[in-house]
């Protein structure tokens, strides 16, 4: 079958890989000159099954309200006269109900476990390298109340098969000696030995090269303008190349993987996709002193920041801002991240080499991505991966390739266009 994938972020590229592996003739359309140059470019680098609590949880509404006016808030709603933002905000509130939060965690953990296993298989199969470390993820807490509140979700994750252990302060430092300097501030931590880290951009670029070698055609510098319908199905995609030539590309099936821009395209087909851009920041700097730099990937609960070691670089990422499609760097937010990194690990990184970046997470209100068939028999979505797009990339893409082939993927997940069976995975 001929399949067109729209977008070459980590999700579109992984989709192309698994579709090609399943024997399809795949073309990828991407406006940038290469793969992984937007949100998949400089993210936190975590393959984090353990990071499954969505932003939308019972404690979020109060926190978000408190943070509304704080320029350096970890999660900042900048209220705008933007209907999509308000609709998303109301849907977010609904996902904060305890039962919804629990259900979302189940989805996120199931997809995370499946996806991490798919990534490992891909690594074994291709030998792909991307500054990855299999040293686990340690989530540390500097606030006793937050640590206590994390115990129940961690127990739920263990119940669901994610090995998230509870650590005392001393155990945190034993796992990651770079935390010794803040031992007195720590309330405790959780550690997931099977989680990983690495450079998502390097991964995406290398996977695109492997996919190209397998016959996938990547059309970079091509902007998707819209989709055409005929006879109750998608009939083609209108694109323009870097010289401004417009053409219509046709295939048997279409996969929309344009990250935060997916809803704009889908609107042209009358489909509402509840995906809103949530801006995040990262800082990347050279390691100055390897003895002070962490090796285990870390999550700082209080500041909602993640820290990954990418070879001889340190990556610190986080913060979330709902402010439309704006991608300008805000100096205050950049400096706040760098300040926190220096406070926690003084001398570990060389701040003179710091590079700041911002990207738009394609977020659904409950952080559960949209994967599966939408409205038309030949239209598929693989989008809305929010905070965990890299973690979920291989699993989402592999599952999508199954759906395109008419097979039920081997995991319990709320796929679009399919009835959801909680016990599906257990039954197989
Ligand atoms: C600060 C930050 C930290 C993060 N940390 C982590 C982490 O530690 N672990 C993790 O798992 N996830 C993390 N994420 C989330 C993860 O990076 C995203 O979920 C993921 O990159 C989304 O991938 P995507 O392919 O859907 O989107 P993108 O990477 O944005 O790809 C979409 C592609 O579509 C293309 N496109 C859009 N519109 C058009 C058009 N009209 N025509 C042609 N092409 C188009 C874009 O150019 C782009 O290349 C983080 C995100 C941020 C912002």
Image (tube, grey):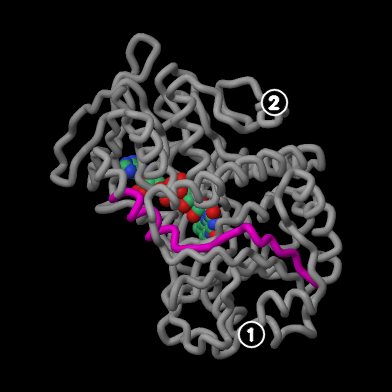
Residue 48 lies, in percent from the top left, at: 60, 56
Q: Residue furthest top?
A: 231
Q: Residue at x 84, y 59 (%)?
A: 149
For this view, does 217 lie left or right of residue 300? left
Q: Is mark 1 within 8 Å of ligand 1?
A: no
User: Do we see residue 87 in this rendering?
Assistant: yes
Magenta span contains residue 204: yes
Report, in whole angstroms, how far the alpha carbon at label 1 lies from the one at label 2: 49 Å
For this view, does 125 lie left or right of residue 276? left
Pointer 2: what residue? Answer: 427
Residue 417's tag is none
Which span of residues is magenta-colored? 188-209
Pointer 1: what residue? Answer: 343
In the rendered view, tell whether residue 70 sits above or below residue 127.
below
For this view, does 246 lie left or right of residue 334? left
| Image quarter in which the C terminus is found | top right
Q: Secondary structure at mark 1?
A: helix
Q: Nearer the viewer, residue 328 or 13?
A: 13
In the rendered view, tell whether residue 276 sits above or below residue 183.
above
Q: Residue at x 54, y 75 (%)?
A: 332
Q: Secondary structure at mark 2?
A: helix
Image-quadrant location for residue 275? top right
In the rendered view, tell whether residue 95 sits above or below residue 64.
above
Observer-side mark, 1 or 2, equals: 2
Image-quadrant location for residue 174? bottom right
Q: Nearer the viewer, residue 348 or 411?
A: 411
């Amino acid at each position: 079958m001929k399949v067109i994938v729209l977008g070459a972020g980590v999700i579109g590229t992984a989709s192309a890989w698994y579709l090609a592996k399943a024997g399809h003739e795949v073309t990828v359309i991407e406006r940038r000159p290469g793969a992984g140059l937007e949100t998949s470019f400089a993210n936190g680098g975590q393959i984090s099954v353990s990071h499954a609590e969505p932003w939308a949880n019972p404690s979020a509404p109060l926190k978000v309200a408190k943070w509304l006016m704080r320029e350096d808030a970890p999660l900042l709603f900048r209220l705008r006269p933007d209907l999509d933002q308000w609709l998303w905000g109301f849907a977010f509130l609904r996902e904060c109900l305890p039962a919804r939060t629990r259900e979302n965690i189940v989805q996120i953990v199931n997809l995370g476990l499946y996806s991490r296993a798919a990534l490992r298989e891909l690594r074994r199969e291709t030998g792909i390298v991307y500054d990855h470390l299999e040293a686990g993820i340690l989530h540390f807490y500097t606030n006793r109340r937050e640590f206590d509140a994390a115990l129940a979700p961690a127990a739920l994750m263990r119940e669901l098969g994610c090995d998230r252990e509870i650590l005392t302060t001393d155990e945190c430092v034993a796992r990651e000696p770079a935390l010794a300097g803040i031992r007195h501030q720590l309330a405790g931590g959780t550690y997931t030995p099977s989680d990983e880290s690495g450079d998502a951009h390097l991964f995406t670029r290398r996977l695109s090269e492997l996919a190209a070698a397998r016959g996938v055609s990547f059309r970079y510098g091509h902007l998707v303008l819209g989709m055409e319908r005929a006879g109750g199905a998608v009939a083609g995609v209108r694109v323009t190349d870097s010289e401004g030539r417009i053409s219509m590309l046709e295939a048997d099936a279409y996969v929309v993987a344009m990250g935060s821009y997916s809803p704009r395209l889908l609107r042209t087909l009358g489909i509402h996709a509840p995906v809103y851009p949530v801006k995040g920041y990262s800082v990347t700097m050279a390691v100055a002193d390897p003895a002070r730099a962490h090796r285990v990937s870390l999550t700082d609960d209080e500041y909602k920041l993640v820290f990954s070691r990418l070879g001889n670089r340190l990556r610190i990422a986080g913060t979330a801002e709902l402010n439309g499609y704006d991608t300008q760097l805000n100096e205050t937010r950049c400096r706040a991240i760098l300040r926190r990194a220096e406070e926690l690990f003084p001398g570990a990184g060389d701040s003179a080499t710091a590079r700041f970046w911002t990207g738009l997470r394609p977020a659904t209100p409950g952080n559960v991505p949209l994967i599966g068939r939408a409205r038309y028999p030949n239209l598929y979505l693989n989008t809305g991966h929010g905070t965990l797009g890299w973690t979920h990339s291989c699993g989402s893409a592999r599952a999508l390739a199954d759906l395109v082939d008419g097979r039920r993927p081997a995991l319990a997940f709320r796929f679009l266009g399919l009835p959801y069976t909680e016990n599906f995975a257990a039954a197989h």
